[in-house]
Image: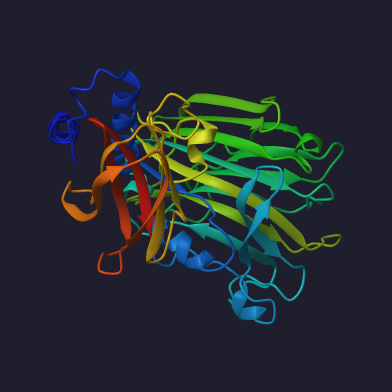
Amino acid sequence: MKFHLIVPLLQRHRIFSCKSASLLLASLLLFFHSHAQVTLSANGPGSTYELIESVLGSGTTGEVPDCGHTSFGRHITEVFDADLNKNVFIFHIHTTPDNDRCGSNTDRQRNEIKTFGSSPANVKAAYGETVTYRWKFKIDAGFIPTTGFCHLHQIKAGDGDDGAPLITLTPRAGSPQKLQVIYTPGEGLPGSGEKASTPLAPFKGAWVEVVEKIKFSSTGTYQVTIKKVSDGTTLLSYTNNNIDMWRSGTTFCRPKWGIYRKLVTGMRDEQVRFADFCIAEGSATCGSTAALTTPEIASVNDKTDATAAISVNIFPNPFQQTTNIDLQVKKAGNTIVEVFDMQDKRVARVLNTSLKPGIHRSLLDTKTLPAGSYVVKISHNGKTYTKVILKQ
């Protein structure tokens, strides 16, 4: 869907004529979320690989050490995190017997997710494109950085000159231990090495949020800011407005997240937690931290708005086949609940009745619908509210 189609879409849903600025903003956010942003958030234990691949594309969990350590099971799991008050991903790595994808490299090990050539276009970067990445991570309080490479994030060419990553975030042993931003240009070109660093101590045992904005071209730009989630303290900030962010023979660039480390002495088993991945193209941004907690788009009907005539809670989200739509009605009136696909085609009508004040639950069964994102539209007393849901 192109930008010039927003107005007709809002007019058909009777949103454009609404005088509520917050509702119009919610509708615009819905558009950008659906078409310029991709978000990935944990939703609880089980089907973790399937959740990741439903967003980033089939095969994106292919760099895990499961085959060499079958007794442990999947090396990316989900757990409820008390600090964030939500489910998060845990990337597990063990000094032994974890390896590098059961391949020939015996000097390193990895547990990473990434996009592929077959992944959706909106999670891959094309030449000349500007992309914003936002995510959270937490290393353990006892995390041991190594003297060799130990990457938690990479920006890498997808093909062509794709040997070394363009950018890495790398914890490094030393006095003091530090987190590095390392840049590597194309093969044979100068300018490689550490571009920024900061002491690692404030990262240990604390959730941080990373915002990374990149213009992918031979005369590109690179910006990264890392802040503590608890108080917003900036731990690292770096900007380079003239940096080669492309490689010879490359058709796309991609992000990677996880643990990729060289096997050296003094290592230990590690768990690194990740949460709330977001990829936004062009002028779109990933929004506030709160906006990444679920795949929903907040609107004037959000349950934190005490003045709204109706509040909506859709759970679970994402979901496999069925999900619950809870409506807390504050003012009686006629209520219609419908579901639309991303081409604005109505695919289900859940409810069309008059509701009295109170809580009303409806079940949405999507077994006949393919996996993907959908829009739930709730009309109540002449006002329209929207939320995005994700079927896995």
Image quadrant containing the N terminus:
top left
Q: Is residue 383 above or below residue 111?
A: above
Visible residue check, residue 294: yes
Q: Is residue 333 above or below residue 103?
A: above
* Most foreground residue, 226 or 229: 229
* Left or right of 25 on screen, residue 108: right
At x 47%, y 60%, the residue is: 52
* Most foreground residue, 298 or 127: 298
Residue 334 image offset from top left, x and y in percent: 25, 39
How many circles with numbers are drawn on the protein? 0
**Residue 322 appears in which quarter of the rendering?**
bottom left
**Residue 356 appears in which quarter of the rendering?**
top left
Q: Is residue 158 above or below residue 131?
A: below
Residue 192 image offset from top left, x and y in percent: 58, 39
Visible residue check, residue 104: no
Residue 136 image offset from top left, x and y in percent: 60, 42
Residue 168 image offset from top left, x and y in percent: 59, 44
* Most foreground residue, 54 or 21: 21
* Left or right of 91 on screen, residue 148: right
Image quadrant containing the C terminus:
bottom left
- The residue positioned farthest toward the front in the image shown: 356
* Most foreground residue, 75 or 302: 302
At x 38%, y 28%, the residue is: 300
* Left or right of 275 on screen, residue 313: left
Q: Is residue 255 above or below residue 244?
A: below
Tell me which colouring the rendered structure shows.
rainbow
